[in-house]
Image: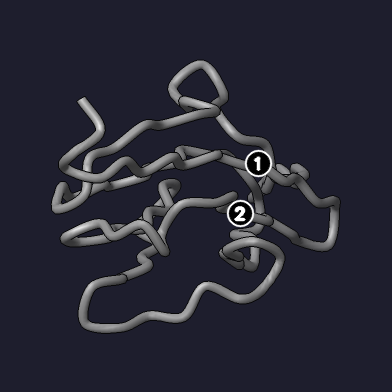
Amino acid sequence: MHWSIAAAPEFSTEQIHESLTLKEGETIIMELPYSASPAPRVTWEFNGRPLVASRRVTVDVIRNITSACIGHVEMVDAGTYTVTLENAYGKSTCSIRVKVFGEFFE
């Protein structure tokens, strides 16, 4: 007999920072571990709009971790990044506020 466990998506929140402050030029990797069965659909948004991959921005899902990497952070990268996990059993959302300051902000 084969058993499969169905579970709504859930973030492992103890490993997630809700707010990050960065200096222009730094690289950020936001990694969000989660559990779900079956594997959820993962979507990233930036300030309420889909996060678009580019030369500086990559989004990944590997096993039970989703991540967004932003290279050479700029002031325009400041805002709220929201990740939504959704499968047939439920939905979970997590947001991270990112602040960016310039080189003259000491």
Residue 59 lies left or right of residue 8; in this view the side is: left
Q: Which mark is residue 66?
A: none
Residue type pointed to by label 1: Cys
Around disc 2, counting alpha carbons within 10 Å, would you say few (fewer than 14), some (14 to 19), or many (20 or more)?
many
Kindly identify which residue carries mark 1: 94
Q: Residue at x 36, y 57 (%)?
A: 75
Q: Residue at x 44, y 22 (%)?
A: 15
Q: Residue at x 30, y 70 (%)?
A: 58
Q: SS for tag 2? A: strand
Q: Quadrant of residue 94?
A: top right
Q: Position of residue 13 (x, y in %)?
A: 57, 24
As displayed, is residue 28 above or below residue 53? Answer: above
Q: Residue at x 26, y 47 (%)?
A: 28
Q: As drawn, which residue projects farthest toward the front? A: 104
As displayed, is residue 77 above or below residue 64? Answer: below
Q: As drawn, which residue projects farthest toward the top? A: 14
Q: Position of residue 37 (x, y in %)?
A: 65, 50
Structure colour scheme: one colour
Q: Earlier in the sequence, mark 2 or mark 1?
A: 2
Kindly identify which residue carries mark 2: 83
Q: CA distance from mark 2 to mark 1?
A: 5 Å
Quadrant assignment for the C terminus: top left
Nearer to me, 7 or 65: 65
Nearer to me, 81 or 36: 81
Q: Position of residue 77 (x, y in %)?
A: 41, 59
